[in-house]
Image (spheres, rainbow, N blue to C red):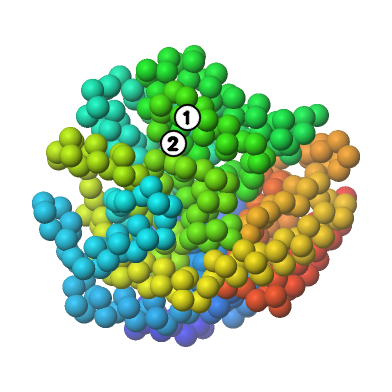
């Protein structure tokens, strides 16, 4: 039996939780046949960088939940600020000329910590809603400017921008498109800047330019006067931590400028310190017009997202646009906004982003790259506190395994049994641990990762 901190959630045995889960719970992104076979993993509490399951096992969270718990678990200030806000004003909205202090204060803080072109924010409840907002705002922008035919948004194959109809359409995940008739009209995809997988004999720098020029080719194919925007994650997270070559984003920026299309940097994963800069845009020198944010914005303690809007776009929407017929009940939820304000203050006051850039990030990257000597690892790449390992059959030729995903899933399960959460994207193992990791935590992660790779190799051969 496990103890529970809330009298509303009873204590039950692992077997009882698993039986109830199997009976009633339709999970997101879960193979239910495998779930029924193995039984769900029930996480009951967490502290710092560690999760604890219903059997009391400690697991190092190498993924910060879903790339969001950047400050680690158990930060009392975040819980207390939510509690106080819920007593003061648990809910009010920002529709119809209303607002409340937590949302206004968060808007002010976000404008302070984001790149200088951003002067406004539109709040949402998630990253997916932020990307739906991007589609609405981008099309509204061109409409107001008298170019309503500019509706097409160009994205990339294997991108991830969320799971709503618009978010999944902007994303380039073939298995998602295959379910539900996606993408919706007006969204097209170009190749991704995945040098390890697709670069062939080109150097990363050459390949970066080739991949970026696919944007120009697509704009010309569609007709420049029909293209509204290009969207990309600075680093593709869910696609397998694909870090574009240094030549990629500068070329994309030039092309967007050349054809006058809006540039959207989806910072839902990269934002709030993951790369060692406040935003991935700063790491790559991207100057975008719109910037979806979520996840690390509240360190995952409460759901919140938003879209940062550059001054030139905001002015069109505000001065010429009139009513923007868009919004969510939980756009700027007071408790979520209060927690996000506290998160930003902690990031600042504790110098966490600087520490990722100059101390724990370089240390993790140095140790991570040591794994490249393992017989299964074709490439170990990363930036700040995000990284990927390519598991391959043949390191010299970069040839992968016959059944993509099998070895990755095996490795992921072995990691869990060794007390480490590492995620598998096909046969790419990825990490994005809490930004507050210590060097000892990094060493533990590396030891567990290496042991898990050894066991994976043993079981696979
Ligand atoms: N955009 C990116 C880059 C993401 O990685 C995600 C989620 O992983 C989303 C958007 C969607 O965010 P949410 O799951 O909060 O809707």
Residue 319 higher or lower than 111, as above or below: above
Residue 116 vs residue 447, the one in the foreground: 116
Tag 2's secondary structure? strand
Q: Would you place residue 251 above or below residue 421 in this image?
A: above
| Location of residue 459 (image quadrant) | bottom right
Q: Looking at the image, which is closer to me, 387 or 105?
A: 105
The residue nearer to you, when weighing 194 against 31, is 194
Task: Report whether the residue tagged 1 is closer than 8 Å to ligand 1.
Answer: no
Tags 2 and 1 in contact by the CB under 8 Å rule?
A: yes
The residue identified by callout 2 is 263
Residue corresponding to mark 1: 256
**Who's the residue at 29% across and 79% down the image?**
83
SS for dot 1: helix
Residue at x-position 43% and y-position 14%:
223
Query: Which is more toward the observer, 167 or 359?
Result: 359
Rendered residue at 41%/26% (across/down): 260
Residue 109, picture quadrant:
bottom left
């Amino acid at each position: 039996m496990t103890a529970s901190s809330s009298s509303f959630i009873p204590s039950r045995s692992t077997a009882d939780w698993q039986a109830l889960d199997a009976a009633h719970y339709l999970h997101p992104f879960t193979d239910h046949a495998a779930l029924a076979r193995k039984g769900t993993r029930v996480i009951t509490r967490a502290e710092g960088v560690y999760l604890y399951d219903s059997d009391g096992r400690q697991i190092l969270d190498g993924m910060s939940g879903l790339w969001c718990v950047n400050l680690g678990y158990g930060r009392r200030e975040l819980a207390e600020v939510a509690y106080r806000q819920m007593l003061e004003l648990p809910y009010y909205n920002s529709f119809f000329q209303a607002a409340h202090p937590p949302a206004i204060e968060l808007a002010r803080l976000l404008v302070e910590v984001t790149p200088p072109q951003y002067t406004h924010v539109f709040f949402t409840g998630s990253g997916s809603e932020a990307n739906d907002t991007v589609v609405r705002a981008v099309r509204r922008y061109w409409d107001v400017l008298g170019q309503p035919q500019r509706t097409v948004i160009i994205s990339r194959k294997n991108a991830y921008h969320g799971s709503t109809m618009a978010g999944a359409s902007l994303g380039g995940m073939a298995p998602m498109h295959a379910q539900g008739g996606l993408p919706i009209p007006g969204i097209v995809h170009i190749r991704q800047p995945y040098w390890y997988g697709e670069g062939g004999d080109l150097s990363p720098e050459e390949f970066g330019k080739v991949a970026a020029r696919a944007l120009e080719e697509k704009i010309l194919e569609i007709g420049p006067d029909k293209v509204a925007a290009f969207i990309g994650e600075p680093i593709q997270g869910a696609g397998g931590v694909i870090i574009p070559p240094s030549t990629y984003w500068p070329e994309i920026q030039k092309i967007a400028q050349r054809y006058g299309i809006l540039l959207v940097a989806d910072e839902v994963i990269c934002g709030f310190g993951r790369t060692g800069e406040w935003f991935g845009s700063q790491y790559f020198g991207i100057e975008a017009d719109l910037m979806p944010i979520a996840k690390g914005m509240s360190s995952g303690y409460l759901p919140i997202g938003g879209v940062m809007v550059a001054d030139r776009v905001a002015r069109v929407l505000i001065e010429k646009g009139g009513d923007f017929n868009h919004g969510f009940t939980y756009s700027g939820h007071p408790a979520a906004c209060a927690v996000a304000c506290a998160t930003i203050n902690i990031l600042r006051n504790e110098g966490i982003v600087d520490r990722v850039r100059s101390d724990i990030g370089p240390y993790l990257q140095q140790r991570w790259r040591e794994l490249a000597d393992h017989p299964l690892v074709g490439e170990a790449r990363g930036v700040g506190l995000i990284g990927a390992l390519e598991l391959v059959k043949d390191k010299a030729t970069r040839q992968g395994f016959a059944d993509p995903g099998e070895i990755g899933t095996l490795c992921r399960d072995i990691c869990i049994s060794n007390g480490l959460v590492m995620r598998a994207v096909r046969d790419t193992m990825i990490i994005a641990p809490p930004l507050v990791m210590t060097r000892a935590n990094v060493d533990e992660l590396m030891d567990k990762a290496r042991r898990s790779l050894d066991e994976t190799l043993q079981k696979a051969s």
